[in-house]
Image: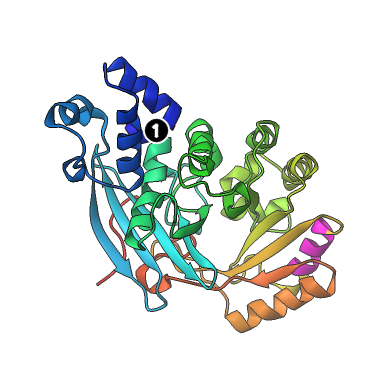
Amino acid sequence: MLLDLSLLELKEYVKNLGLPSFRADQIFDALYKAKSLEEISNLSKEIKEKIANYYPKYEILKILESADGTMKMALKLEDGSIVESVLLKYKYGYTVCVSTQVGCRMGCKFCASTIGGLKRNLSAGEILLQVLLFNKIVGGTVKERGVTNVVLMGCGEPLDNYDNVTKFLKLLSSKDGLNISQRNISLSTCGLVDKIKKLADDGFSITLTISLHAPNDETRKKIMPIANAYKISEILNACDYYFSKTGRRVVFEYALIENVNSSAEDMLELSKLLKGRSCHVNLIPLNSVKEQNLNGIPRKEAYRLMNILNEHGISATVRRTMGEDIEGACGQLRNKLGGGK
């Protein structure tokens, strides 16, 4: 797909077609404006026919809007795969939450994305397409973008699709494209230790977010199968390595699940675990997933637990829940059409 290519790579592609270099600029501009092939007015029919097989083909199946302004898009890709992504509106601008895989093989017990397992990885261009479509929807352009931040927290484990995800990060932060700073990009992982270290070694400086969700390995194994492969101590060592290489503090996500990981004792244990580290904890009252028999806790109780962390020197906040009424909140995205009336 042409969206997988950088501008330099696109110029080489156009050259091999026997076309002048400026045609690459025209195609690149159309791609980043999320134009269909038919909407491009400055390319001849002959040129369109030459690039047709590799031009993005997709269908927006549905866009749902939440009462809080959150938008969820179901996108059907060329092979029939469906992915969901979300647009979140904040005071500072728009954030897009993208999916990186069709489904997920991590098997976390509280997440809708993993139901049915992993279907396939998304290419760099398929991930980028989600951002470009929302940028177009909010009236943004390539140079005056509407989207200011991107989070890789939709369907899939980003580091399980390392090559495509890192190519996407390069495309997203390229000065030729949307030029979104890596400081405005967050990647959430359940803790693939070797890939966390590789991310640092490969020179990336995005915000690393760890889906921790437990203060000890025993509890984590009950809700996250990945805990059988990597101990929390190994993940924390990888986080320390990432911080040493990038200087970026790590964010720990913690979904609060009733009768599983949400007691005062759990918060005290978490405090000891993270003491002395440059980090922040996002407490998230679990968002409901109808197939999973797990419940969240009241937000009032979440704030009480936050105070315990704060009192013990750990920076923590309770994450604002957005888009839950359209199944667009954390842990609710799927690889099929979901939510809505």
Q: In front: 144, or 35?
A: 144
280 in relation to 173, above or below: below
Q: Is residue 269 magenta?
A: yes
Q: Is residue 159 magenta?
A: no
Q: Position of residue 289 (x, y in %)?
A: 42, 64
How many marks are shown on the rendered structure?
1
Q: In front: 192, or 31?
A: 31
Measuring 47% from the left and 39% from the top, which residue is drawn there?
A: 176
Q: Is residue 328 left or right of residue 221?
A: left
Tag 1 residue:
4
323 in relation to 230, above or below: below
Residue 122 can be seen, yes or no: no
Q: Give the image's coloring scheme.
A: rainbow
Q: Residue furthest left?
A: 45
| Segment tinted magenta in the rendering | 266-274
The quadrant in which the N terminus is found is top left
Residue 319, by quadrant, is: bottom right
Q: Position of residue 79 (x, y in %)?
A: 24, 37
Measuring 27% from the left and 38% from the top, which residue is drawn there?
A: 56
Q: Is residue 45 left or right of residue 110?
A: left
Q: In front: 66, or 156?
A: 66
Measuring 79% from the left and 73% from the top, which residue is drawn there?
A: 310
Measuring 45% from the left and 66% from the top, which residue is drawn there?
A: 88
- Which element carries disc 1, helix, strand or loop? helix
Q: Position of residue 135 (x, y in %)?
A: 38, 56
* Amino acid bearing label 1: Asp
Q: Alpha-carbon neighbours of circle 1 within 10 Å: few (<14), some, or many (≥20)?
A: many
The quadrant in which the C terminus is found is bottom left
By secondary structure, the bulk of the magenta-drawn segment is best described as helix
Residue 241, by quadrant, is: top right
Residue 4 can be seen, yes or no: yes
Q: Is residue 330 left or right of residue 297?
A: left
